Amino acid sequence: MNSGVVLPATEEILAATRCVDDGVHRVLGARDRVIPWMGKYEAPIEALSLIYLVIRHAEAVGTLARGDLVMLPSALVVTRAAFETSARSQWLVYPKEVYAREARWLAHMKSEENASERLGKLTAVQGSTDHSLGVRAAEIQKFREAVSERLPPHIKRIDALPNLRAILVELGEEAKYAAYIHLSQFSHGAYHASSFYRDDPWKQRVLREAVGPLDWAPVLELTWWALSSASRRLFRNVKRGRAALRLDDLDAEMEGRITAIRVLAMNPSAPKVGARVECGGPRRQ
């Protein structure tokens, strides 16, 4: 029976996705143990909410990998979302001072205020008589400013969120910005993104689908970073969090799985699992 799968996942890739799944289970288990000590402040709770987003993104990457390796372009888009969400979560709780974290939470909230205001103006120009978005923006602004006034005087107010590169610099992860640029090409439909399906025209115009197991190594590696780094950053700031979250053994296992993917994919004598297949547009059924 034809399952419709173009490029089945290798055992090494399947093992890496299982490692990510184990990490998700450990993060959620640790959360259950430390929830009573999360405290009264908003930044840690919002950082946890962002981690939930990262978890869903990580699960989606695993689902795509297990389903068919030619789903790589979509996995790259989802990995970018996981990466950026993780960085935002870490940035929220990076300061040691709790009120500095709250100031960051307010800046994070302002992004929703700005989005509602922009969408409200856009829909009004397009003739909408629904003013709910503008009302929501005003409500958020009122609440945000009221909370900001209650912060201690020495806490710096943040007018706008820093860009991702600045966030990565603060986190000591600037080296990963190049990977983010690569991922962004697939979110924006850039020329580079279509390279899986064509050779450069000044070489030879050939349409094909050039996706292989090796291409999944950085996707799974960055997905694991997004999940583990955001979780560690949050739990180290929560009472009993360090003891509750144990990921060191999974770090080592994931590193081994990624290495295995790269070694097998680059070994000329290793069996190749459809590294290059004809591009037939939509998936074959």
Image (tube, grey):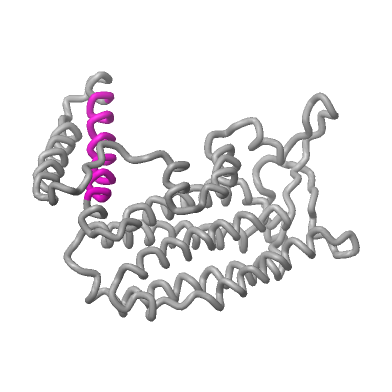
Q: How many marks?
A: 0
Instruction: Please tell me whether the stretch drawn in magenta is mainly helix, strand or loop.
Output: helix
Residue at 78%, 34% in the rendered image: 199
The residue lying furthest to the right in this view is: 269
Q: Position of residue 82 (x, y in %)?
A: 47, 53
Residue at 43%, 42% in the rendered image: 166
- Along the viewing direction, whichever of 219 and 180 lies nearer the viewer: 180
Q: Is residue 48 magenta?
A: no
- Along the viewing direction, whichever of 224 and 121 lies nearer the viewer: 224
Picture quadrant where residue 135 is located:
top left
Q: Quadrant of the N terminus?
A: bottom right
Residue at 41%, 72% in the rendered image: 27
Q: Position of residue 5 (x, y in %)?
A: 69, 57
The residue lying furthest to the front in this view is: 154
- In the displayed structure, does residue 56 sit left or right of residue 120? right
- In the displayed structure, does residue 45 sit left or right of residue 257? left
Q: Position of residue 17 (x, y in %)?
A: 59, 67
Q: Position of residue 106 (x, y in %)?
A: 22, 46
Residue at 30%, 60% in the rendered image: 96
Taking 97 as reference, is 185 above or below it? above
- In the displayed structure, does residue 215 sit left or right of residue 174? right
Taking 271 as reference, is 187 above or below it? above
Picture quadrant where residue 30 is located:
bottom left
Q: Which residues are magenta?
A: 103-122
Q: Is residue 116 magenta?
A: yes
- Along the viewing direction, whichever of 240 and 210 lies nearer the viewer: 240
Picture quadrant where residue 250 is located:
bottom right
